[in-house]
Amino acid sequence: MAERYSSFTPGGTGWFLQRITAAFLVVVLAFHFFLLHFVNHAYEVTFMGTQTRMQNVGYFLTMVLFLITAAFHGVNGVYNALVNQGLEGGRKKAVLAVLTLASVALVAQGIYVALAMRGMI
Amino acid sequence: MSQSYNRGLVEDFGRWKEFSAGMWAWIFHKFTGWVLIGYLFTHIAVLSTSIDGAQGKTTMVGGEELNVYTATLQGLEGLFLIRLLEVGLLAVAVFHILNGLRLLMVDLGVGLEAQDKSFYASLILTGAITVASVPTFLTGVTI
């Protein structure tokens, strides 16, 4: 029986959050690529330029939210892909713990970086 | 409940010749997702040079004193390989976005009967956007 391939339970919190973050990320990821490759060019990025962008509160908060939602969406996606592959029991719990730690560390480091870019550290 | 039928496991990659459009979309979405989350960790690692940069740390590049963050990013951007990888990243991101939109539509029950066609449209649009972006991504770099 393989009616559904997703390990997400439709209507469940994980399923719902994965889709809410997806809707946000579709817009912000496209914006991020457009801003830093087409409006500004990645090869012209300087600390001054980054600092100027991050001084804008709206941009700063969008980037922090982008980081949090992307980390959640990505790590939740990886976890569910592994569950689809048949991960079970103790290994499933261990993988969840490692992925949770990795994402918390990523978000913490990312926020620290964002604050440094904004000149707050 | 709609009538169900057994398509077998998508994880059984040996059956790839039998895969339908939706199964390929599923596999490409997983693959691009793995690439994107892997890249996010790398991205934050590289951007972490801004912590030293914010402290005013500099490094000498070609006789010029540059902020370490500026030097790191511009140094990486000066590599042709990095530019190629960026084009690849764009392709991966664009496909994940377009197929993601397709999945949101499928979840909402919109256009279910055209889900195979929308997968092909995602692929074609990804190719077109990627090809159109190559000149921008390869500006100012040589092999």
Image (cartoon, helix red, strand yellow):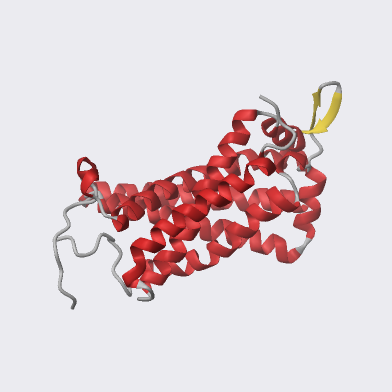
Image coords of residue B85 (percent x, y):
56, 36
Is A66 in front, or is B107? B107
Name the residue located 40 percent from the left edge and 65 percent from the top edge. Answer: B103
Name the residue located 66 percent from the left edge and 28 percent from the top edge. Answer: B79
Callout count: 0
Image coords of residue A33 (percent x, y):
63, 52
Quadrant of the drawing holding the C terminus of chain B: top right
**Looking at the image, is A112 positioned above or below residue A73?**
above
Q: Quadrant of residue B86?
A: top right
Image coords of residue B36 (percent x, y):
49, 47
Image coords of residue B72 (percent x, y):
71, 33
Residue A71 appears in the rendering = no
Residue A61 appears in the rendering = yes
Quadrant of the drawing holding the N terminus of chain B: bottom left
| Residue occupying the far bottom of the picture | B1
State left or right for residue B63 relative to residue A45: right
**Looking at the image, is B129 positioned above or below residue B50?**
below
Is B31 in front, or is B54? B31
Name the residue located 52 percent from the left edge and 47 percent from the top edge. Answer: B91
Is A117 in front, or is A10? A10
State left or right for residue B73 relative to residue A66: right
Q: Quadrant of residue A68?
A: bottom right
Name the residue located 57 percent from the left edge and 51 percent from the top edge. Answer: B129
| Residue occupying the far top of the picture | B63
State left or right for residue B124 relative to residue A97: right
